[in-house]
Image: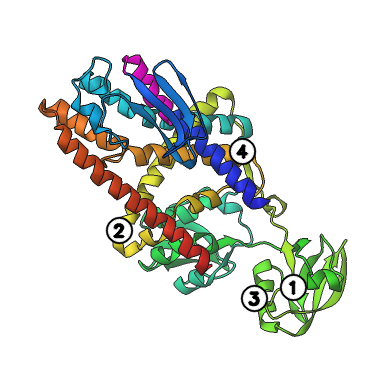
């Protein structure tokens, strides 16, 4: 069921973004009396799932859910309809319009996507506000994976600053390390300030598994059990707080996980507190070193979160700021792909990666936040100066406006072919990366 919910959210989000993106092109085309022959959600090679005609435009739904398109008369686009281009130009055609009108038609989709993202972010902040864990409130310090331990961090460290600059939101620590080329992390270790250098080798390794690098450390309370849980079979109950293994006193979840892995196929006595009273329960640790317990994951149970409420007028500048900063961060991520030493290209993902970012339960706040993020990505990717993308058409139009010379139809045809080859190659590479990761994981 979880996978169905993820796919449903992804397709709904994609449909909203594609329809509104193409509506941007459609709006300016109609504004300048340019004929739109087709307006499609998803692609329709050979046949469509649904179609009807109104006026000069055929509206429909294709069967390949990878995007959508509008076909504008008199324009060299992905349809590669060269027969039309051999006919004399007509007043209603794209090629007959002034360059400034053609420019607005081409940037209409990107403009709508960017403005849509700002609107969604503003409304999300207005309806739900903003809640986060301040870095200073991570009172138990951090738990580290092997990579974090390798660079010199330790379990229990409290992160103070990055390159001697404070980071307000704990969730911003990871992106800041990756995107801002930081050199060091300052931590409070048992009351002493320790400087931990960040080696260049960290970024490529971090991009592969960013979520596991550091997490807030927290006490171990039982929230739930897996199926056939050894702990449940031994008498554990929801709400139990685990505080020790055999004679070893242990306070935090990461310590339990590490210590249990040392006792595979052995029976251990686990100390816990139930309803304020101490209790010992013996349990055999399986080969995998896990006793089948989900820890309490609600951070509000352990930490003081900060909640910011926004009035309607306050939410608008806050939403604009969030959209602009999201775009800025995405541009930084995009640059990493072309920085060989980061090996960011290995982390490039396709539709499976995008689908996975949606939660396994339907959550409207997450849905709209992710839709805004994807709208930013769609706007940025489409404005890249690559033939076959909106940005490619914009590039040639700007050349025409500056030089007064219009590129020939043959040149535009070849450029479109090259752009399509590049895009399909990138699409194939990204989605093959997804497939390889599925088998690897």
Q: Which residues are magenta?
A: 21-34
Q: Give the Cα separation between the discs numbered 2 and 3.
A: 36 Å
Question: Is the magenta region chiefly helix, strand or loop?
Answer: helix
Residue 365, labelled with which disc? 4
Q: Give the Cα separation between the discs numbered 1 and 2.
A: 43 Å
Residue occupied by mark 3: 258
In the picture, measured across the screen, residue 357 lies left or right of residue 384, that is right
* Quadrant of the snapshot with the C terminus: bottom right
Give whichever of discs 1 and 2 has the lower sequence position: 1
Residue occupied by mark 2: 339
Give whichever of discs 1 and 4 has the lower sequence position: 1
Q: Give the Cα separation between the discs numbered 3 and 1.
A: 12 Å
Residue occupied by mark 1: 291
**Front-lying residue, 56 or 46:** 46
Residue 218, labelled with which disc? none
**Front-lying residue, 185 or 47:** 47
Q: Give the Cα separation between the discs numbered 4 and 3.
A: 35 Å
Give whichever of discs 2 and 3 has the lower sequence position: 3
């Amino acid at each position: 069921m979880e996978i169905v919910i993820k796919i449903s959210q992804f397709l709904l989000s994609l449909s909203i973004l594609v329809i509104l993106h193409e509506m941007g092109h459609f709006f300016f085309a109609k504004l300048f009396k340019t004929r739109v022959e087709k307006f499609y959600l998803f692609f329709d090679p050979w046949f469509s799932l649904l179609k009807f005609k109104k006026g000069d435009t055929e509206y429909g739904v294709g069967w390949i859910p990878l995007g959508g398109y509008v076909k504008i008369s008199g324009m060299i686009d992905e349809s590669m309809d060269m027969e039309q281009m051999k006919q004399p130009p007509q007043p209603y055609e794209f090629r007959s319009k002034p360059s400034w009108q053609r420019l607005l038609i081409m940037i209409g989709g990107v403009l709508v996507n960017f403005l849509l993202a700002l609107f969604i972010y503003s409304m999300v902040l207005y309806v739900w506000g903003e809640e986060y864990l301040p870095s200073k409130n991570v009172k138990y310090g951090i738990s580290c994976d092997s990579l974090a331990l390798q660079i010199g961090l330790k379990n229990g460290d409290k992160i103070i600053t990055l390159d001697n600059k404070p980071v307000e939101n704990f969730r911003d620590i990871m992106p800041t390390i990756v995107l801002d080329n930081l050199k060091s992390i300052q931590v409070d270790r048992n009351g002493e300030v320790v400087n931990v250098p960040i080696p260049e080798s960290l970024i490529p390794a971090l991009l592969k598994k960013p979520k596991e690098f550091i997490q807030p450390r927290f006490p171990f309370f039982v929230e739930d059990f897996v199926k056939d849980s050894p702990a449940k079979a031994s008498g554990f109950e929801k709400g139990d707080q685990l505080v020790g293994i055999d004679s070893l006193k242990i306070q935090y979840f990461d310590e339990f996980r590490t210590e249990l892995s040392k006792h595979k196929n052995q029976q251990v006595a686990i100390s816990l507190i139930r309803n304020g009273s101490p209790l010992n329960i013996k349990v055999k640790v399986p080969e995998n070193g896990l006793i089948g317990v989900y820890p309490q994951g609600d951070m509000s149970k352990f930490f003081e979160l900060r909640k910011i409420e926004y009035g309607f007028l306050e939410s608008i500048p806050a939403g604009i700021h969030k959209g602009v900063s999201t775009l800025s961060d995405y541009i930084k991520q995009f640059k990493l792909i072309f920085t060989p030493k980061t090996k960011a290209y290995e982390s490039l993902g396709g539709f499976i990666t995008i689908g996975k970012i949606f939660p396994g339960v339907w959550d409207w706040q997450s849905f709209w936040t992710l839709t805004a993020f994807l709208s930013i990505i769609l706007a940025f990717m489409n404005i890249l100066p690559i033939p076959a993308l909106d940005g490619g058409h914009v590039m040639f139009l700007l050349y025409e406006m500056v030089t007064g010379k219009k590129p020939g139809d043959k040149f535009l045809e070849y450029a479109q072919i090259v752009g399509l080859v590049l895009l399909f190659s990138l699409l194939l590479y990204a989605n093959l990366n997804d497939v390889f990761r599925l088998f690897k994981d």
